[in-house]
Image (spheres, rainbow, N blue to C red):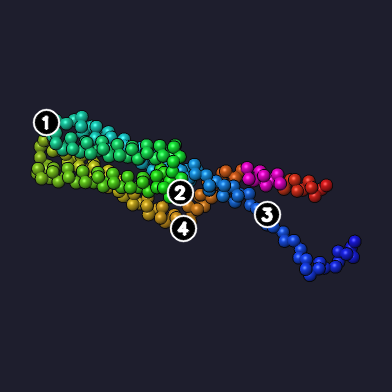
Amino acid sequence: MSELEDFPPPRGIQPAATTPAADPARIQQNLLEEQVELWWFREPRKSLLCYCVAVLLILGCGLGGVGLLSTTTSVSSEWRLGVGTALCLLALAVLLKQLLSSAVQDMNCVRSRRRINVLKSGGLADLLVVLLTGVALLVCGAVLLDLALAMHMPKPGRALNDMFISGVVLLAGGGAATLAVVVYALVIFLVEQTGPGQRLRERAVGVFTISGRMREARRETTSSLAQLI
């Protein structure tokens, strides 16, 4: 038997090539990539950040608008009514975006990865909503400051003082929102260029590979038992 093993195989017959073992983690990752439901939660930190910003905008604009509308008097009825209505509409717009994203996600009617990346919390739609809200706040604040300065501020009178203070607050809020969107977009662009975003996605997918590792360990145990037999 040992003499037969010393002879090389015939020329026409090639030894069977060993197929590389499949990586269970890679297979599990590919399976997860095909799950549409998981596309909405691929970046939880970004989604949580944008959700908190949306809640702050809704509360700030809503409470500010209701406060201005509730304190409307005959002396300052025009600008309070206009700015209060604008703030309430901005709060409703941000809330409508959040409700729309939740409804689309629950109905599972969108199957395109590109559209999901736009609509999900932390996507392009959130950036546009926050940017438009910031620009609208800047416009309202600038209009109020122009009106206050046109009436020769500072001037004794609570109505004009309230107009000036409201304009400053709206300018500060709009500037902060607009600057936050610009900084956020730059950071996300740099992260995607340098590569840590891909590592974070692989780390998030690695949470779901427990079953794959268990199967791999079970297969190794079975093969070792077979060799002992």
Residue at the spot 79% in from the left edge and 70% down from the top edge: 11
The answer to the question of whether label 3 and label 2 lie on touching residues, with beta carbons closer than 8 A, is no
Secondary element at image label 1:
loop
Identify the mark nearer the N-term, 4 or 3.
3
Residue 103 location, quadrant:
top left
Q: CA distance from mark 4 to mark 2?
A: 23 Å
The answer to the question of whether label 1 and label 3 lie on touching residues, with beta carbons closer than 8 A, is no
Name the residue furthest bottom: 11
Amino acid at the residue labelled 3: Ala
The answer to the question of whether label 4 and label 3 lie on touching residues, with beta carbons closer than 8 A, is no
Identify the mark nearer the N-term, 3 or 2.
3
Q: CA distance from mark 1 to mark 2?
A: 53 Å
Taking the magenta stretch, the answer to whether it contains residue 187 is no
Q: State the residue position of label 1.
A: 74
Q: State the residue position of label 3.
A: 21
Quarter occupied by the N terminus = bottom right
Q: Nearer the viewer, mark 1 or mark 2?
A: 2
Q: Nearer the viewer, mark 4 or mark 3?
A: 3
